[in-house]
Amino acid sequence: MTPRPLAALALLAVLAGCSPAPRTADTADPSAINTQQALDIGRRIAQCGREHGYPDMADPVLDGDRLAWPGDGPDMKERLRALEEVPECKAIISQMQALGAPRSATAVSAADMEKLKAFASCMREHGVDGFPDPKADGTFPLVGTPLETEGKSERVLAGIDACKHLYDGRIAVS
């Protein structure tokens, strides 16, 4: 089974892919560090899940520069929500969320912002009612909404497929 990115955590762990300063051979790539940190924290979340009622919870893997959970789906989202009620696990999940600090407004070009707005409009036109316009930092305010809970349903995937010609970059949520 191919792991799919888990919207709730994977997109909260959105990584800043660019460094404003030129890199030299001895300068660490910040996105590589954050990717490794996200993977390490994800493994700790899985371990906490195994210790608190989910003995079969798999460790996450990297899918490009995003975290993916084998067996991702509604069951995994429910597990993560349940783990947020366990203080030990919630502390680890909070560390993951801290990695996904919002990007600065300068991280999104005016051209990309227009593409993101067109993508949002297209999603609404293709049956994903309530799909929000992007915020100034280029993220879509989906956390805590019914659309986040719905995840990658057939309806959402159909909208993405119909609209990907407008924006084919990473869709980050906040």
Image (spheres, grey):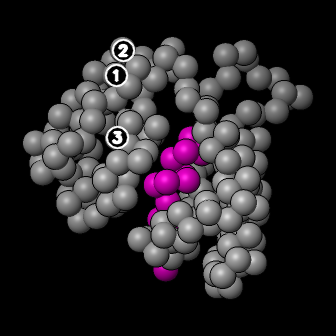
- Disc 3 marks which amino acid? Asp
Residue hosting label 3: 168
Q: Position of residue 51 (x, y in %)?
A: 75, 78
Q: CA distance from mark 3 to mark 1?
A: 13 Å
For label 3, the SS is loop
Q: Residue at x 61, y 60 (%)?
A: 84
| Residue 159 horizontal/vertical position (percent) | 20, 51
Residue under the point 68% across and 73% down: 49
**Is residue 111 or residue 145 the one in the foreground?**
145
Q: Position of residue 8 (x, y in %)?
A: 49, 54
- Report which quarter residue 24 is drawn in: top right
Identify the element where label 2 is drawn: helix
Type of the residue with mark 1? Met
Residue furthest to the bottom in view is 55
Residue contact between numbered discs 1 and 2, judged by CB atoms under 8 Å: yes
Query: Which residue position holds label 1?
Result: 113
Task: Describe residue 127's horizontal placement relative to residue 91 as left or right.
Answer: left
- Under circle 1, the secondary element is helix
